[in-house]
Amino acid sequence: MIDADYILSSLTKTFPNDLSESKIESDMRLTSYVEKDAIFNVCKHMLDNLECNHLSCECGVDYPDRNELEVVYHIASYEHPVVITLKVKLPRDDPEIESIVSVYWNANWYERETYELYGIMYKNHPDLKPLLLIDEMLGDWPLRKDYEGFPNKTSKNLV
Amino acid sequence: MGEVIENVGFTTTSAISDFLKKTPAQDIINWGRKNSLWFLTQPMGCCGVEMISTGCSHYDTDRFGIIPRDSPRQADVIVISGYVTKKYLPALKRVWDQMPSPKWIICMGDCSISGGPFYESYSTVQNIDEIFPVDVFIPGCPPRPEALIQGFIELQKKIMAKKDLGTDY
């Protein structure tokens, strides 16, 4: 039976230096920070050896106080009831991380959306272009906390 | 060969349309137009669900001549039934350009009036009525199908009163 304990021990055995602040919340939930150079290999290991074959979501978080961006991966499995949360810290002025599209194919659009909203550059992404926003808004990074490009003009139909 | 024909009464299309607009013939034309308001099935948000159910048999909009159409080439009315994102605006303009004149626009729901929950969002377009000639606004989030039918009836009244923006008088 593969549970959170088993996955954490397997990950720490394979990547002894790359995981930090690992926390087992229950049998089903595992949270860990991963070094940004190792995330591709960690994902590949989880897909190949741990049957974690479902990437639920991939998103970004902005922490302006720490001057950091985080990429959050939620990886689940169809074989056993475990959801693993992996977080990667990136510097805010040069966020760049390896794309995991070649491991989990559905990360393609997640990474495009995170790219256009947070400005996180994904290396080796097959087609990194905006997904939901127009091309002119590229570079604004609207979901960063210091974004100031809101229209700020009152709709004239409101009194 | 080469004869110059003189003193023949000419007429032009603009003269015909001027004649129609200035005589009661326009009232008859408007009567026909207002009773065949075919609207485009182009749902854009949760109001689109209400719009589709309005077009279904329960509300029987055929009695007003209101029929949903799938093609912009065959539609008279476009219902902006939701938020317009900046990405979607070019496609909406294209659909609007594909519709043959005379054509009318109904803004349905709070999103298309003022942005609604997406008020001052970074990715939605503010003030739709600056971009399109909107005839009727229907507030509500979402409005009930009865409200949409009333919006159509208000549009019919505007057409009969020659106050609509869709026709060039």
Image (cartoon, coloured by chain):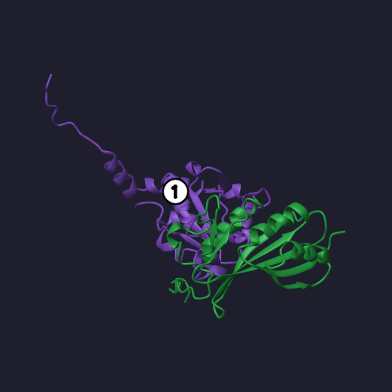
Quadrant in which residue A77 is drawn: bottom right
Chain ID for purple: B
Nearest the eye: A153 or B132: A153
Q: Quadrant of the N terminus of chain A?
A: bottom right
Q: Quick check: can you spot residue B120?
A: yes
Which residue occupies the extreme right position in the image? A1
Q: Secondary structure at mark 1?
A: helix
User: How many neighbours does mark 1 have within 10 angstroms: few (below 14), some (14-19), or many (20 or more)?
Assistant: few
Nearest the eye: B118 or A62: A62
Q: Quick check: can you spot residue B150?
A: no
Chain ID for green: A
Q: Position of residue A3 (x, y in %)?
A: 83, 63
Nearest the eye: B59 or A27: A27
| Side of A111 relative to B72 (left or right) | right
| Side of B104 relative to A88 (left or right) | left
Q: Residue at x 11, y 22 (%)?
A: B2
The answer to whether residue B132 is above or below residue A27 is above
| Side of B23 relative to B139 (left or right) | left
Q: Residue at x 33, y 48 (%)?
A: B21
Q: Which residue is disc 1 drawn over?
A: B94
Nearest the eye: A28 or B81: A28
Amino acid at circle 1: Arg
> Dot 1 falls on which chain?
B
Q: Position of residue A156 (x, y in %)?
A: 43, 72
